[in-house]
Image (cartoon, coloured by chain):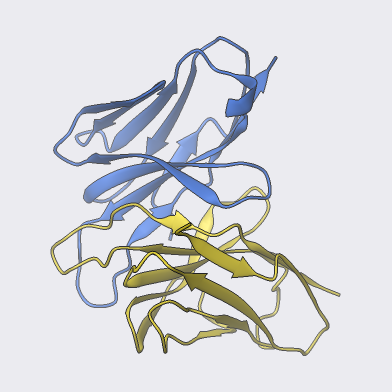
Chain colours: A blue, B yellow
Amino acid sequence: SQQGEEDPQALSIQEGENATMNCSYKTSINNLQWYRQNSGRGLVHLILIRSNEREKHSGRLRVTLDTSKKSSSLLITASRAADTASYFCATDAVYSGAGSYQLTFGKGTKLSVIP
Amino acid sequence: DGGITQSPKYLFRKEGQNVTLSCEQNLNHDAMYWYRQDPGQGLRLIYYSQIVNDFQKGDIAEGYSVSREKKESFPLTVTSAQKNPTAFYLCASSLRRTSGGSTGELFFGEGSRLTVL
């Protein structure tokens, strides 16, 4: 089952603009993570935000988490052509017993940054 | 360099054949995972292993099998029972999650693209 759902599915912006992607999820989580995937490559971890955190920064990335709304957003500021990639949120659900598995990924937002 | 190595990068299979995808890590991670990715889709979990000689089914385990005889290795076999195996397969590893704990960062390989002829 895919718990995280990203919005929008695709986003096209000009270089230098900010890009915002959203993620909604359904159940209680320990943490939420964002990953980046260049076309045809593996995923790369960007940032992890714990359930008791509301905002986190890493370079040009800003992530927010609203557990009451079960949603998160990823903001990339001053975008560059090299930011063109797909971005996925992944949720780490609260442990629910033997057999429960860990991170579940959404379908991703495909970001295109036009030079 | 520490990381995860998947091989082969591209693989072609004929109908009715089993194929095995290799995944090796030198990160000293206990947990390893196999995900499948279809075009325009997210990642779906096939199998995961928290420790040597133990593994659990994920969402879409039917038609797949795994083994975890060594900490460093988690091969995935796509059997002839998998009706639609053409996809991009991703292996990942992480520190082990304990009961009541949380899963940290996953480290991914570069993927293996399987095509059925």
Q: Position of residue A105 (x, y in %)?
A: 44, 52
Which quadrant, please, contains the C terminus of chain A? top right
Residue A61: which quarter of the image? Answer: top left
B103 relative position to B71: left or right: left
- Residue A44 image offset from top left, x and y in percent: 48, 46
Task: Specify the quadrant of the image occupied by residue A23.
Answer: top left
- Which residue does the image show at 59% across and 19% down from the upper left? A80
Residue at the location (54% across, 80% down)?
Answer: B75
Indicate the quadrant where residue A9 lies. Answer: top right
Residue farthest toward the right in the current orientation of the protein: B117
Q: Is residue B48 above or below residue B17?
A: above
Q: Nearer the viewer, residue B109 or A8?
A: B109
Residue furthest to the front: B1
Residue at 20% from the left image edge and 64% from the top image edge: A95
Marks counted in the figure total 0
Residue A89, position in %: x, y? 42, 43
Q: Is A44 left, or right, of B101 in this rendering?
A: right
- In the image, residue A41 sits, relative to residue B46, either above or below, namely above
Which quadrant is the N terminus of chain A positioned in? Answer: bottom left
| Residue at the image point whose x is 58% and y is 27% from the top | A83
Q: Where is residue B70 drawn, in percent x and y?
A: 41, 85
